[in-house]
Amino acid sequence: MVETYGVTANLTVGEFSRMTHLSVKTLRHYHQVGLLEPAEVNPGTGYRYYLSDQIPTAQVIRRLRDLEMPVAEVREVLSASDTSVRNALIAAHLDRLEEQLSKTHSAVESLRNLLEHSGEVPTVEHRTVPAMPAAGIQQVVDLEDVLSWWQGALGELHATVRAQDLHATGPSGGLYGSELFQHGRGQATVFIPVEGMVRSIGRVVPFIVPAAELAVLLHQGPPTDIDITYGELGAYAAAHEISIEGPLREYYLVDAQETPDSEKWKTEIGWPIFRSDGEP
């Protein structure tokens, strides 16, 4: 049955396995799901045979699966009508891998920061914040989407403030409803306090940042581990029995507008509190 390699030779599943580094079990699975079918199956014995011409296909499959491409997508790549379609499918998968790698890297760095956290009691400032006019974007968002929403909304705000020649009177900031954290979906607002009349355009509208009494703590670094600072500030407010309901607040003292290096970013976290008249 076996003839000269590279012509019409039928290879046993064991031989094909050794040549492609795909196990017999894996080849059986690929046959069952229609990804790599043998060239011939003996109806009497059930033995499977492959052509040497199938070796390059097997090698492509092995590499795509090593890159964790789902079987269904591998099948699409193999059946692509032309090279451009095939390359587009592979590129889309590689983009997803790079995005996942970036998320993994951020999670690793955040965990390291948490493990190396000093545990020192932070310095918390009490601050009275007056109401102020601003340009704002307000929307109900999912917690898992809030970071990408925040980046896009702030970029749109800064562009609008520049386009309307408005003068910023303070750092940009954000307000985040408790339901966003408690239920995974809630109202989020980003704003830039400005002097001048804000003309509504796109998502940007005139907005009044409400007055508040806040306990304030500085977070330095990227937003991926900002929950550490939130935890410290919330624990402080609870320990002093001054925490009240209200949106949590952030002020972006140094952000992507100043530097692309997120390690240099500085964000003030504001926790709504009750203050007695005599409290400094």
Image: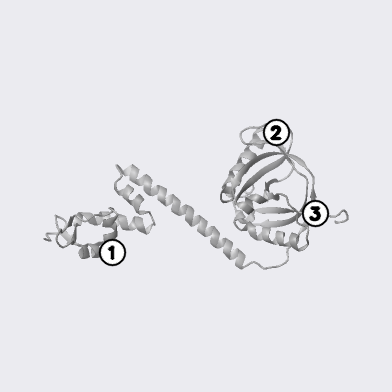
Instruction: Residue 123 in the image: state x and y as whole percent.
Output: 75, 61
Q: Which of 206 and 48 is in front in this view?
A: 48
Q: How far apart are marks 3 and 1 (CA)?
A: 66 Å
Q: Local crowd at mark 3 within 10 Å, few (<14), some, or many (≥20)?
A: some
Q: Nearer the viewer, residue 262 or 15?
A: 15
Q: Nearer the viewer, residue 260 or 40?
A: 40
Tell me the residue that label 2 is attached to: 198
Rendered residue at 26%/56% (across/down): 31
Q: Distance between the residues labelled 3 and 2?
A: 32 Å
Q: Which of 159 and 90 is in front in this view?
A: 90
Q: Which amino acid does label 2 sit on?
A: Val
Q: Local crowd at mark 2 within 10 Å, few (<14), some, or many (≥20)?
A: many
Q: Local crowd at mark 1 within 10 Å, few (<14), some, or many (≥20)?
A: few
Instruction: Please identify, in this view, whether the residue under mark 3 or under mark 2 is nearer the observer.
Output: 3
Judging from the image, what secondary structure is the residue with disc 2 in? loop
Instruction: Residue 100 in the image: state x and y as whole percent.
Output: 48, 55
Instruction: Residue 41 in the image: state x and y as whole percent.
Output: 18, 57
Q: What residue type is labelled 1?
A: Lys
| Residue 117, quarter of the rendered image | bottom right
Tell me the residue that label 1 is attached to: 25
Tell me the residue that label 3 is attached to: 274
| Residue 202, quarter of the rendered image | top right
Residue 223 seen anywhere in this rendered image of the structure:
yes
N-terminal-most mark, 1 or 2: 1
